[in-house]
């Protein structure tokens, strides 16, 4: 295990203060992994800056001494983006947690990177505003992490993802320069959109310390519905019919049979465990439109073979119905010791076929896969229930994953819809992009971080 | 004047066919300028490829012979982005005009770069869909040009700009490589968002030959309103009140007194010529919501001092009211021989003060400036009415522009909201961005086009 030299630790203590520099083995353990299964590595030190200037000084120190830097927030990532490198310096931004401003006139919000995502939306809600991106981790994850990973969530089809709400940010570059990209202007074409290169760059190009977000008026009404199906095909047909009716619901989520069974077993919400697909639908906006769209969506679900369709009477019941989907991952995670959550995404029209394909692969390789995800935006989460110590089963998972990735690419999909490449998807990236795009992407990394200081070994081989 | 060698012309004739290669002086004249005032330069040759492969071959030939390449569509640009370099090769994409596919299931549209933007929306309208970006040039400009410039339009506040609708494209890189960036997936985080670097890169990084666009269901209703004010301050207060009421209209445009007078003089629509501000407002969506929002907006306009507020009875009358805004530039352009259209943009909260500032600058330098633009998104078009042969007046314009740019940057704005940097805004770019961001941007150009083949001398000095 690599250690950071005592001399450097001393310098870090001087830049920050000793209580914000962790170096003992027992202190480093909790920072050795993130939310990704089966990946861990001990950092050399973990520091907790309070200002962008402190971040910059730490980067400069690391740079002068050739110590790689890995940035993290709450560490909820699912592709190993914030897993340390052996002996690296981890810059943890959770103490930079000031919500600086809600600007109601310009419909923007300004916050330091360490603010919890849910607190962003809570601050909006107080003044009738709305921050739509809602990754599953939003109660724990930081907004800086969300921006670095370009996090998705349940509302992608109607509201887009984190990228669509980032207007600008302060960032520390690999050479320690502190700069601001973007501004509060709704329109800006002054040169290349540099901010878009940093959003979703997974900590490999810069360290984002403060963000300006776009926010929206909060929808006045919302209606939650649940539809149960005896066939996944019928669930997909319902979605096509809803889109054909020119309705864009804010949420269209599904769980397959394996996942429904695990959720019911875990949460006892009274779901029938013999359904092939459970679909959670939500529409939001003006009360009149919500009522009209909800009625149409329920009728379309029935017309397309739903066994049962129910609407929540109020917000509280809506939250109970949505809990089935919100609990999916936790419910699956308790079945076996290791849970490998995948993230393949296909054009919406290919979704039903893709779910069937995953089912067939599971049978072929005798694996337990629960699939859930975002029907509206084609983002699937096939989840392998396994035990990382069972090497033979882990090998079969590799084979299955290989087939799923191959099919995803064949139908024009992506190997990661919202979790990122990190360490977990590195081996698939070039195959998806092709040589030309892959080298183009690598040339950006080389241009912006020639020394390979920030999060080396992530995204690219 | 530089000529392209006969040997190269021969090769171009072989790659394409002689009828798609222009080289005679009289044929080159119409390709020596774009929509930007006072900028022209004769190219060495203009070619009209039909396929991406032909584009790639032309780029390779130019690269081998060190002939700079400038790409253009219809040439409606307003910052000199498609003005040729002396003796360069112009690749004109207007003959690549196939609208390939409207995919109703995935809500996407696929088209070659030379398709006229309005045809994109017309094709959408036929099946109840909607392509929102509506730059002033949309009846003439090509979708490829729109993507290269990240064009705005009148609907920025509610619907965003061109970038928000580009899901992917085929692009020829400076080394001739043909690659595809992006796909039909609603979510995709497989590495850096390379497509976002090319959108708005003004032909300096690659040549986009085909695009996949995101489209939306077409709004079922729309209501157009006109409000007249005796003070710009009151117009701005109305906008703040509308936003505070949690309404996001699709259009909030304004004309100042000079512009209203010119429009009335030109189009005789019966506008009073003594108003300080004319505001065009539109709301679209569900009929019930549109009626409700329109009533609220009209009440807010009256409550905030509008002298007169009228609503269009139907679409036709709406179009007539909107014509006042749509005609603004043409109306101003006929007053004096030269029209210099600026494009400064500020956070919405700074807009009224900025309009007043421009007014004061006009008086100070004894200039005729008509200002119109997008109240909802802070994008202003102060338009200098002048004569480029009057060097003394042109000098005063330079001084005035300098002051306007300085103030724009001071209040956190941008020197260009939707027209691009090109040649016209080059000298202001570094001042707005600061050294750090500017160098970062330049490092992208160097990494992706090290030879400086594509549109050299644009954006950067």
Image (cartoon, coloured by chain):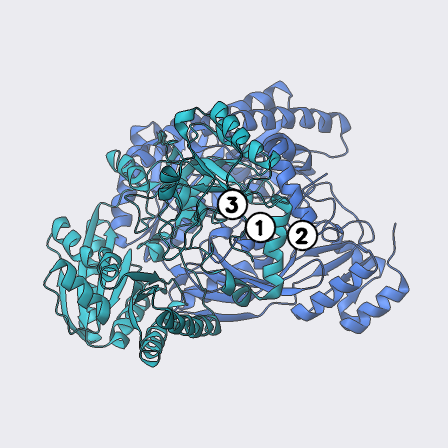
Chain colours: A blue, B cyan
Residue A51 figure quarter: bottom right
- Residue A448's disc is 2
Check chain identity for marks 3 and 2: say if they share one.
Answer: no
- Identified at 38% across, 69% down, the residue is B391
Q: Chain of mark 3?
A: B
Q: Chain of mark 1?
A: A
- Badge 2: how crowded within 10 Å, few (<14), some, or many (20+)? many
Q: Measured from the top left, where is residue A223 in percent x and y?
A: 34, 49
- Residue B198's disc is 3
Mark-to-mark CA distance, 3 and 1: 11 Å
Left or right of residue A398, residue A378 in this image: left
Q: Nearer the viewer, residue A55 or A301?
A: A55
Left or right of residue A303, residue A145 in this image: right
Q: Is residue B291 visible?
A: no
Q: Of tags 1 and 2, which is closer to the observer?
A: 2
Placement of B192 over or under B293, stated as above or below: above
Q: Is residue B436 visible?
A: yes
- Identified at 54% across, 40% down, the residue is A417
Q: Measured from the top left, where is residue B201 in percent x and y?
A: 50, 49
Q: Which residue is mark 1?
A: A197
Left or right of residue B208, residue A250 in this image: left
């Amino acid at each position: 295990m690599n250690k950071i030299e005592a001399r450097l630790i001393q310098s870090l203590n001087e830049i920050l203060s000793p209580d914000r520099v962790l170096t003992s083995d027992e202190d480093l353990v909790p920072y050795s992994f993130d939310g990704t299964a089966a990946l861990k590595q001990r950092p050399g030190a973990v520091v907790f800056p309070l200002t962008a200037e402190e971040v910059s000084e730490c980067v400069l120190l690391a740079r002068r001494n050739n110590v790689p830097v890995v940035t993290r927030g709450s560490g909820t990532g699912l592709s190993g983006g914030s897993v340390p490198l052996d002996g690296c310096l981890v810059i943890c931004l959770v103490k930079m947690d000031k919500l600086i401003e809600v600007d109601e006139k310009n419909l923007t919000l300004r916050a330091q990177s360490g603010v919890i995502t849910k607190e962003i939306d809570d601050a909006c809600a107080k003044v009738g505003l709305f921050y739509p991106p809602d990754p599953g981790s939003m109660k724990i994850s930081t907004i800086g992490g969300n921006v670095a990973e370009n996090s998705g969530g349940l509302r992608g089809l109607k509201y887009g993802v984190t990228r669509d709400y980032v207007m600008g940010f302060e960032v520390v570059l690999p050479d320690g320069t502190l700069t601001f990209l973007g501004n509060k202007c709704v329109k800006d074409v002054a040169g290349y959109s540099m901010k878009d290169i940093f959003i979703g760059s997974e900590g490999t190009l810069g360290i984002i310390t403060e963000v300006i977000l776009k926010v929206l008026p909060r929808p006045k009404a919302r209606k939650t519905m649940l539809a149960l199906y005896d066939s996944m095909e019928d669930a997909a047909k319902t979605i096509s019919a809803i889109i054909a009716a020119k309705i864009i619901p804010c949420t269209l989520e599904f769980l397959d049979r394996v996942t429904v069974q695990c959720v019911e077993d875990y949460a006892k919400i009274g779901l029938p465990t013999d359904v092939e697909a459970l679909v959670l639908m939500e529409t939001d906006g003006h009360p009149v439109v919500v009522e009209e769209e909800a009625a149409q969506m329920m009728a379309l679900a029935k017309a397309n073979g739903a066994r049962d369709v129910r609407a929540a009477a109020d917000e509280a019941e809506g939250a109970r119905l949505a809990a089935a989907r919100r609990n999916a991952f936790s419910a699956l995670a308790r079945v076996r010791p290791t849970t490998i959550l995948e993230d393949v995404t296909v054009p919406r029209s290919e979704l039903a076929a893709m779910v069937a394909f995953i089912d067939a692969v599971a049978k072929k390789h005798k694996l337990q896969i629960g699939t859930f995800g975002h029907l509206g935006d084609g983002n699937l989460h096939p989840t392998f229930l396994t035990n990382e110590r069972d090497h033979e089963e882990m090998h079969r998972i590799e084979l299955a994953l290989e087939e799923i990735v191959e099919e995803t690419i064949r139908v024009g999909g992506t190997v990661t819809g919202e979790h990122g490449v990190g360490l977990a998807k590195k081996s698939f990236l070039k195959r998806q992009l092709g040589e030309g795009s892959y080298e183009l992407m690598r040339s950006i990394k080389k241009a912006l971080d020639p020394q390979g200081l920030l999060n080396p070994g992530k995204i690219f081989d």
